[in-house]
Amino acid sequence: MFTPVDPQYEERIRSSFERQGAMRLIGARLTRVEPGAVDITLPYRADLTQQHGYLHAGILSTIIDTAGGYAGYTLFPADSSVLTVEYKLNLMAPGEGEYFVAEGRVVKPGRTLCIVQGEVHARSAERSTLCALMQQTLIVLHGHSDDSTRRK
Amino acid sequence: MFTPVDPQYEERIRSSFERQGAMRLIGARLTRVEPGAVDITLPYRADLTQQHGYLHAGILSTIIDTAGGYAGYTLFPADSSVLTVEYKLNLMAPGEGEYFVAEGRVVKPGRTLCIVQGEVHARSAERSTLCALMQQTLIVLHGHSDDSTRRK
Amino acid sequence: MFTPVDPQYEERIRSSFERQGAMRLIGARLTRVEPGAVDITLPYRADLTQQHGYLHAGILSTIIDTAGGYAGYTLFPADSSVLTVEYKLNLMAPGEGEYFVAEGRVVKPGRTLCIVQGEVHARSAERSTLCALMQQTLIVLHGHSDDSTRRK
Amino acid sequence: MFTPVDPQYEERIRSSFERQGAMRLIGARLTRVEPGAVDITLPYRADLTQQHGYLHAGILSTIIDTAGGYAGYTLFPADSSVLTVEYKLNLMAPGEGEYFVAEGRVVKPGRTLCIVQGEVHARSAERSTLCALMQQTLIVLHGHSDDSTRRK
């Protein structure tokens, strides 16, 4: 388990999440914030689909990239920001469910880089299916707090 | 250069794109459809952003995954569908621009799998910046035409 | 847990491993063969290093790609072969240890594709360090048994 | 095109390559060293193969990871080292040829991170086949020259 250097990590992440226009647009919610572990939950909507009516792979990417980034960010210092360097996503089952839970889990935190794994589960009353698997690299931007870094 | 087996490939792709709820939601348009090459253009909007006001990495993913998938699909037979097996995306500059152009380009088509590279460029009147780089694997689903494959 | 369709899976994998010239050259051994789980162990040698004297990342890749491929292959039918479609590897610590254990674990088997995760641990009498993390896609070649598929 | 900050970049890379035990073991040679572009050539040998007699995917990885790393390193300052953060490799054709050429090409250099693309071509007198495609992230270690960084 991980011990966060910033005891206010949860507040910092909830406040950052609130500033994300894209999360609001798609209807995603932050449903778990623990040291090294963040979940995002997204209900299915017809306007989030690809051509066959399943949840769009890009929308799955959007929630798992965000869950992974914040999972790392729970362990970063207060006056830092987080950026995704890269990630790789395998899509293993159609995005078919009533809602989707993206789980980001830190594998290895570091001073500069942080490695994260992620899963997206498609859920309904009857079942849960692992539909995407991610491996992600984050970078810590020291000395730039999240709420001071703004697009001009 | 590639020669498509289905001469109606452009119509097939435009019709599939129209069925994507997610493309409509974010305001993406299909701006190039050629054999092995598809571009998608997305204007910046404040409701597509991450916490710093830049275009969300997941939205960049959504347009480049789609451009890559359709680039491959131009070369697939008429009675087939396309699925993304996996992709890897490097984020190289903040998503800062007036609009974004995602360019999917087939590197190697195959009977079952198809390998694609992609780039996303952030553009404004003054400049163009390469902000994301993708490598993607697609799979051909033979005998399942795109418009007959529907979520129940 | 997984149930292999071929009860002779262990013999099939050990015999395939024996035919790998590269495994012999670097001194790798097969140290675990179970359904969906294969380990390969490699002692450190000075002729397997990069410029700083650590185990070369490519050699780490060689053992984890192989462990992952055989982990998948334990679950494939007898008259099939396995090919790596692609993999992504994060290098998280220098390859510094007395020996290295590459652990391939199937996440999702399928009729055509199989998704695998892998870890490489650097070990010595005193400690064990996670030095590499992999996510891999395999493809099943049906109707081509491993020992009948030979380079001309 | 790129302008190296260290005019002695070629000597620095050739000397680093010479210190790699793994390159000597497999018989790889440095056949191009230009700003942002490095090629490594490897003749086929039976002791570098997987179970079907083709060049082992891990050996392909070893040469393309190295070519990519040195491609980035041509652009780094003299008192720095290079480490691979991660890479993703698609294997697109069997490693079948008389020799293999791994080509690393920098896409985006940066102060801390550097993004590289790579290709491996299998060659014989008659033909050249693209057999692997890579996307790679490197990190610059400032203040640690390559020849001063040694495993204890």
Image: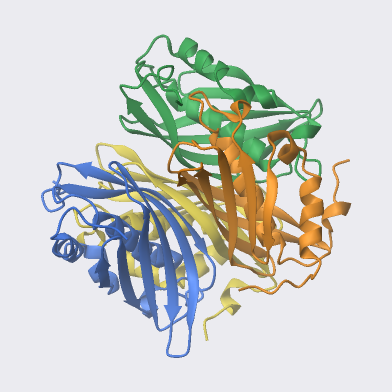
Chain colours: A yellow, B blue, C green, D orange
Tell which residue pokes out farthest to the front in this image. D125
Choose top left, top right, bottom left or bottom right for residue D5: bottom right
* Residue plotted at (43% across, 66% down): B119
Q: Quadrant of the N terminus of chain C?
A: top left
On the question of residue A7 being in view, the answer is: no
Q: Position of residue B91 (x, y in %)?
A: 51, 65
Decide if residue C30 is in sight here. Answer: yes
In the figure, D70 relative to A117: above or below?
below
Q: Among all residues in the image, which is located at the extreme left?
A: B148
* Count of numbered circles in the view: 0
Is B37 placed above or below C67 here? below
Left or right for A39, reference C27: left
- When asked about the image quadrant of residue A48, the answer is bottom left
Where residue D43 appears, as percent x and y from the top left, is: 62, 38
**Residue B34 occupies quadrant:** bottom left
| Residue D107 percent coordinates (x, y) | 56, 66
